[in-house]
Image (spheres, rainbow, N blue to C red):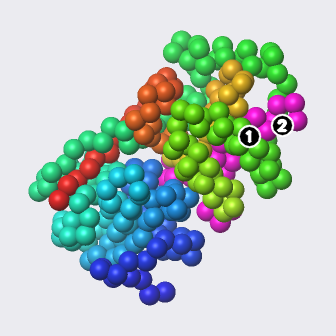
Amino acid sequence: MNQPRFPEFKPIELKDKTVVESLISRHPSEACEVNFGNIFLWRNFERPKFTFIHGNLCILCAPPSEPAYFLQPIGGNRIEETIETCFSFAPRISRVPEEFALKFGRRFRYEPDRDNFDYVYRAEDLIYLRGKKYDGKRNRIRKFEKTHGFRYLKLSPEHVESCRRLLGEWIRAKAATDGFITGVWKQVIEEAFQHFADVGLVGGAIEVEGDIAAFSIGAGFSPDTALIHIEIAHLAYDGLSQLMNREFSKNSWSDFRFINREQDNGNPGLRRAKTSYHPSHMVKKYNIWG
């Protein structure tokens, strides 16, 4: 397949999965955005397209909510020259892991992007919730278990319609305080439903009284890290989101050392929730400006 060479670009499609994943596997990044699943699922919002500069894969994103940006160049050829070429087309390279920024950003202006730091947890912490720091999580789960009968399900096509109903209720509840939820997340999750196997996703759900009350979707990210893209839980059940997180971690990711639950996007409530699980570390990300 002929690949575009700068200044030509090509929108990212499902058929590009092999090429993109092959390059990422040879030049891995800690940033959750440098993952074909995330790039593809968010394509209708981020509008990603790619080109090759000095043999490096360069992905340009142009969301309506912020200035256009490149992800870090994926490859190992003449990276500083590649960055300069990127700056001839867009003002910044964003979602850049700290190691890359410190190595290649010194000739340019770079700064941390706290809203996009990834939260990474030890898988065993999310599975077992051991110790005093997780007392609150365990108590809420026990309260839920005493009050409601439930069963954990491995997500499959037969569950999609029930998940859609839950998603509709969740979005209606969130719409009053966050229009972004209604405009973007519904579309992203629908993409996940439609391309579940194509993208290599894994999902789990909690069924309460015959209905799906929570679901989560993720994928393998690296040999030792899983990535959770989507977490939805019915807002009426206290303790359900904690139960969903534990069960999905236990049933899908017990063979991994770490679980990356992505960023908080600067949302105060989401930041509190993700911090409360005591991450092992953060993937610090930067903007590099031309």
Foreground tag (1 vs 2): 1
Give the secondary structure at mark 2. Answer: strand
Question: Going 66% across and 38% down the picture, which residue do you hit?
Answer: 172
- Residue 145, percent across and down? 78, 20
Per the image, the residue denoted by label 1 is 166
Which quadrant would residue 171 be assigned to in this image? top right
- Residue 127, percent across and down? 62, 30
Name the kind of residue labelled 2 in the image.
Asp
Q: First in sequence, mark 1 or 2: give its number.
A: 1
Question: Going 29% across and 76% down the picture, which residue do you hit?
Answer: 53
Going by the image, does 177 lie left or right of 158?
left
Give above or below for 280 relative to 8: above
Give the secondary structure at mark 1. Answer: helix
Per the image, the residue denoted by label 2 is 211
In the picture as drawn, the residue positioned furthest to the right comes out as 210
Q: Which residues are magenta?
A: 197-224
Question: Going 82% across and 21% down the picture, which residue do you hit?
Answer: 148
- The reply to whether the magenta stretch includes residue 217 is yes
Q: Please name whichever residue, 148 or 282, is drawn nearer the observer in this view of the structure.
A: 148
User: CB of mark 1 within 8 Å of CB of mark 2?
Assistant: yes
Give above or below for 18 relative to 218: below
Question: Going 26% across and 41% down the picture, which residue do you hit?
Answer: 112
Q: Please name whichever residue, 267 or 105, is drawn nearer the observer in this view of the structure.
A: 267
Tell me if mark 2 has few (under 14), some (14-19) or many (20+) residues whose alpha carbon lies within 10 angstroms of its own.
Answer: some
Going by the image, does 265 lie left or right of 228?
left
Q: Please name whichever residue, 47 or 282, is drawn nearer the observer in this view of the structure.
A: 47
Which quadrant would residue 207 be assigned to in this image? top right
Can residue 36 be seen at all in this image of the molecule? no
- The reply to whether the magenta stretch includes residue 142 is no
Task: Assign the C terminus to one quadrant of the image.
Answer: bottom left
